[in-house]
Amino acid sequence: MPPKFDPTKPEVAALIKEFEAFGLSTNSATELVRTPKAGNAFRTLVDENSLAGKSFENSQANALVKLSALGAKLSPDARKYVLDRIVAGDLKSPDQVAAGVKYLEKNPSLPVDTAAFDKASGVGVNVTTADLPALLKAHAATLSSPPKSWSDQGPFLGGIKNSDSDLKWAPTADLKAAVDAFFTELFGSREAASKAKAEAAAASKAKAAKEPKKKVAAPKATETTYDASTSNSPYIPTRIFQEGFLSEFHKVGGNPQINPKLKEEHLKWTKGMVYTRFPPEPNGYLHIGHVKAIMIDFGYAKFHNGRTYLRFDDTNPEAEEGKYFQSILETVRWLGFEPWKVTYSSDNFDKLYALAVDLTKRGGAYVCFCDAEKIKADRGGGKGNPVPCEHRDRPIEDNLRDLEKMKNGEYQEGKACLRMKMDLSSGNPYMWDTVAYRVKNAPHHRTGDKWKIYPTYDFTHCLCDSFENITHSLCTTEFVSARQSYEWLCDAVEVYKPRQYEFARLNLQGTFLSKRKVRRLVEQNLVKSWDDPRLYTIIALRRRGIPPGALLAFVSELGVTTLLSETQLQKFESTVRRYLEDTAPRLMMVLKPIKLIIDNVPDDYKVPVQVPLHPKVPAMGSIETMFTKEVYIDADDFRTEDSPDYFRLAPGKSVGLFKAPYPVTCTSFKTDSNGNVTEIHCNLDNEGEFKKPKAYVQWVQAPGAVHVDEVRYFHPLFKHDPPPKDFESDVNPSSIEVFTGAVVEPAFYDLAKKEITAARTEAHTRTLKAATENEVANDEAKPADHVPEAHGDEPVVTADQLVGMENIRFQAMRLAYFAVDSDSKLSCLDEAAEAKPGKRPGDKIVLNRIVSLKEDAGKKA
Ligand code: ATP
Ligand code: MG
């Protein structure tokens, strides 16, 4: 460990000097010494590469520090590669290093594809201050929602950093200054704009003050098109399809085709209707990012009265498992979408192969016998400038014969592949004779041993889109460069060519979504399962109690553009909170109960109190609760000693109990041998003049109180945000907090029954409707002979999949929003059970906190 930081100590000063000698500024060198972790990492890099005694340009030195911070993500060889590129002066800034490291993380195989690496990390891009104004203008023109005022400056800058524009390689300070100038040109000076904004705000406040009676408007930015009387029926946002990126697509048939006949056929088949698809790879559970894709794919079609396929992209025989097919279909439906058809890329294997033969006959493909390394070298060995493969110009008959041999299993894996004969002069690596088919000796879950060769994503995706007459093929921006090859192939075999549009992925800060990482947590038992409510898989969010509509609202409020960004978790939670605020019924619950006894009423004192389930939504109805001699209040609402800034219960003090006819005043209390309060005695203030209490607290009638076995509060899974690379060791052991002993008012059972019954009704209606409208195999409504040719692992559709304990959601007043966990058992909810609500032997109630009531409370708790 380096010595504790004190820059005046001689050895610390010497260390700073030593770092400065590499070319670092005094500030950076000091910062490195101050943070031992960073300092050690830098020292390791220096030692590993014998850099001691060398000196660099300041920018190179900064780049080296960046590499030392990020390099642990790379293999030693890849790290050395980046180092060499810094030393050679190719990578000139920390941003470039970060981009380079990111590229190598994604593309770890060596040798490095230099051209692709250079492109990803901006090597060779030289943006001067003089170039900036024109580049900014050009960049703004590519945006689907260009900046509209100064307040868009942050997102605009962020968008540049995530874009493909050369701008992102400009020095940050220069870029910032140029953007300031650009915004000033567009919107006038920032000062004037903020003054105008403040004046407008003041004016509207003054206006509001003049009309104090006016009703508060609906919560901002939400579309109130959902059914406010329940949080269970998903609603599908429409605004994002009406304006912005998703409103600017072509009309059906408007996408160009290589041959006019193809357009005619397409229009004839689609009858002008929109067709989209959601194409997950069935290799894991879906996560919150997929909500965005699902909403866009299904939502776009629905908005235009079109249809959507759920297409399992199952061309990789090794990664798939039956349970994922089932879970994916359930998840899509739970979000409120019904696929028109469920299809499988693998069902097209015959057709795809026929087209591969056709393409080869047309001279558009050739069998290549190079190994992976040679193919890579021909593709420019990473430096660009691809050269033709030696097999590129073999006679068509030879290619046809060898393709057939590949199919018949006469070649070993890696010995032959089919490559498309594309365009080596293109600047786009996707055009450099991309592989179409490879030999793979693995049985496929649907086609068994039939195939020894499997088509690649690049060959499969566009053609399956074409077979299904997809009008708008919507995907994420990593596929922008792939669009050229997508279109090339459709044209080369003269089939209908769908139009691909790309939108930005959803990223959440402080969590990861990657299946690979979540799998590590599950396999090491660091979380309970894939649906552990601390995770961001959709099944976990569902279990935690997040309503599907809240997920859709979240995604739609973020908007859909091509700009990548990271969204904060607080934003997610605040959307959920706002959604539940309008839709969740309210109950009284006490987390840490203490019995409060009212001494001045008879033992059988009982006052029925009618309480609306939601103060603003009369349609939710009301419940009856009983005000009795003995009630529970929360330990946190009582203090043994009063103080002037405290308004709840204390000896001699009075407090209101929600909806109870009178307040109570504390007369005495009892404690156990440890000094914990066990009982509070009060008098009901039912005599004399009614005094409005300063504060109200929640309470639960003692007789008939429902005892909750566990209340689970979830906290961030990791101790650090973002979690470190070895995130397994960063798991916070207290990320689940369990309260036992909570009580909730008896109306809980009525509510539970009501919510489940409503959810069942909705699910059955929707499932039946979908069965008549769609062609998905449906266990409830389809005769067996209507089910398409079965392979044994078709996911089944039932109404029950949409119903779960999480449908029982409520706001516990003054506490938080809760949902019943799937670990619970409530026999009274069985359809067969007699109607009477209540706890039966063997029953168990577990509640999950969905979100806190307020953001601050969330941070504290
Ligand atoms: P991951 O590797 O993160 O699990 P993926 O891209 O492999 O995701 P697929 O199952 O292949 O997942 O994706 C199905 C669809 O969902 C694709 O169209 C993909 O673009 C989209 N998608 C995946 N992740 C996101 C995300 N974070 N935001 C938006 N769309 C996404
Ligand atoms: Mg994938």
Image (cartoon, grey):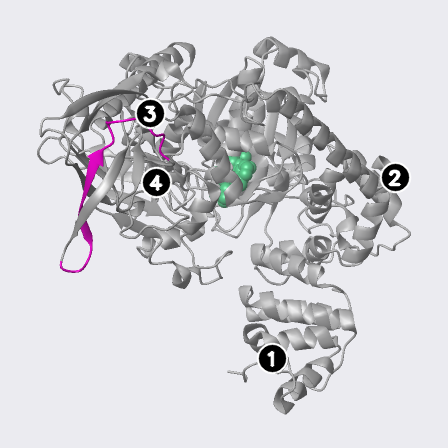
Residue topped by disc 3: 802
Query: Which of the 4 image quadrants contains residue 65?
Result: bottom right
State the SS at label 4.
strand
Residue 718 appears at what percent x and percent y? Answer: 42, 56
Note whether residue 668 is visible. Answer: yes
The first of marks 1 and 3 along the sequence is 1
Q: Position of residue 788 (x, y in %)?
A: 36, 19
Gap between marks 1 and 3, in whole Å? 56 Å
Looking at numbered disc 1 in the image, what kind of residue is underneath it?
A: Arg
Please tell me whether mark 4 or mark 3 is closer to you in this view: 4
Q: With 181 as the anchor, is 856 left or right in this view?
A: left
Q: Nearer the viewer, mark 1 or mark 2?
A: 2
**SS class of the residue under badge 1?**
helix
Badge 3: residue crowd in 10 Å (few <14, some 14–19, many ≥20): many
Mark 4 — residue?
A: 849
| CB atoms of marks 4 and 2 within 8 Å | no
* The stretch drawn in magenta includes residue 677: yes
Farthest residue to the front: give it: 688
Q: Which mark is residue 43?
A: 1
Magenta residues, dominant SS class? loop
Residue 89 position by quadrant: bottom right
Residue shown at 68% from the left, 47% from the top: 162
Disc on the earlier residue, 1 or 2: 1
**Real-space Cα distance between discs 4 and 2?**
49 Å
